Amino acid sequence: MSDSSAESVGTNSARSGADGPDLAGKRALVTGAASGIGAAVARRLAAVGAEVIAVDRSADAVEAVAAEIGAEARVVDLTDLDAAAELGDRVDIVVNNAGLQHVAPIHQFPTGTFSTMLRVMVEAPFRIVRAALPGMYTRGWGRVINISSVHGLRASPYKSAYVTAKHAIEGLSKTIALEGAGHGVTSNCVCPGFVRTPLVERQVAEQAELHRVPEGQVVEDVLLARTPIKRLVEPAEVAELAVWLCGPGTTSITGASFPMDGGWTAN
Ligand code: NAD
C-alpha cells in the first residue's frame, strides 16, 4: 500500500457541517441497515459523504432508511449466501452488522436457529468480505468493520449461538487483518455492551422469564448486572466509532477489538 492511499481519506469538518472523516468517493456496504446500529452506521457514513448501500431483509424498513439518507437499498436475506457474496462487489467499506439473538439454555436451543444465526453472523460476512477483498487489494484501500459484541469477548448463559457467532467473527476479523495488511485493508471489531435497539428490547421479556424478575428490573438487574456504567449504549455512539475506523490516522489500527461496554470487560 502506498503512503498516498494511506492518507486517501481526509477530514471534512467544513463539509455540510459534518465533523468526521471525508468518505466522499467511498462505497460503503452496511448489512442490517434497516434498524438499530446498522441504520445509525448507514446514516453516519452518508453524513460524511460515503455512497452507502443499505442491506436488510426487511424491505420497507431498509427502503425507508435508504430514502432518508440517499442510499441504495438492497433487500437481501443473508441466509442466502450466494446473494450475500454478490453484495461484496466494488465496495471500499464493509460493515458486517446484521445479527439476531435467541435466548435459551443449550439443551433446549433450537438447532435450526443455531445454524441460521451462524449463517447470518459468520458465513455471510465471510462471503461478503471474500468477494470484496480483491477490489480493495487492487485499489490499495479497504475497511472491514465487524459489529461484534462484548459477547465476542465474554460468554453469557443462554446465548450459545450468539456467543459462538461473535467469537467466530472476532477470529475472522483478525485473519482478514493479517491477510489485508499488505494491501491497505484493515479489519476491526466493535464490541458494544447493551445498545438501545429493538434487538435488546426483544430480550427484555425473554430474560424476565428466564431469570424470574419483573420486566422493569431486567435492564439494570440482568442486562447491566456486570456493567459498571448503568446505561444502555446509544446506536449513534457505536456508529461514531465504526466511522472513525474508516478515517485518517487509522492505517495501523487493525486486528483490534474495541469494547464499548460501559466497563463490562474491565471486570
Ligand atoms: P436490530 O434487531 O435492531 O437490527 C438488526 C438488523 O439485522 C435488522 O434490521 C434485521 O432485519 C437485520 N437482519 C437480521 N437477520 C437478517 C438476515 N437474515 N438478512 C438480512 N438482514 C437481517 O439489532 P441491533 O441491536 O441493531 O444489532 C445490530 C448488530 O449489533 C448485531 O450484529 C448485534 O449482534 C450487534 N450488537 C447489538 C447489541 C445490542 O445491545 N443491541 C450489542 C452488541 C452487539
Image (cartoon, helix red, strand yellow):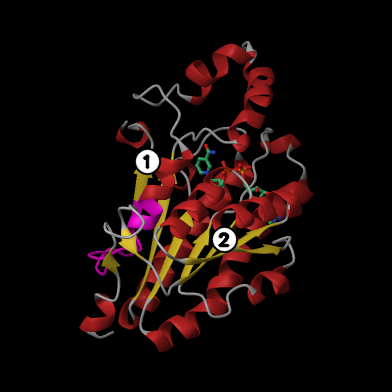
Which contiguous range is marked in magenta?
241-257
Nearest to the observer: residue 81 or residue 31: 31
Q: Amino acid at mark 1?
A: Met
Q: What percent of the width, then of the height, locates residue 66?
A: 61, 57
Label 2: element kind: loop
Q: Which mark is residue 9?
A: none
Q: Which residue is depicted at the point 50% across and 16% down?
A: 221
**Circle 1 is placed at which residue position?**
260
Question: Along the line of sight, which residue is nearer the eye, 14 or 192?
Answer: 14
On the image, the x and y values in percent for residue 122 come to 59, 60
Give the answer, above or below, for where 159 lies relative to 182.
above
- Marker count (numbered): 2
Q: Residues within 10 Å of mark 1 (few under 14, many from 20)?
A: many
Magenta segment: does it hold 254?
yes
Return the residue nearer the eye: 84 or 122.
84
Main secondary structure type of the part rendered in magenta: loop
Element class at badge 1: strand
Name the amino acid type tagged 2. Gly
For residue 211, which quarter of the picture? top right
Question: Which quadrant is the N terminus positioned in?
Answer: bottom left
Q: Which mark is residue 70?
A: 2
Q: Quadrant of residue 12?
A: bottom left
Task: Tell me: residue 117, above or below residue 126.
Answer: above
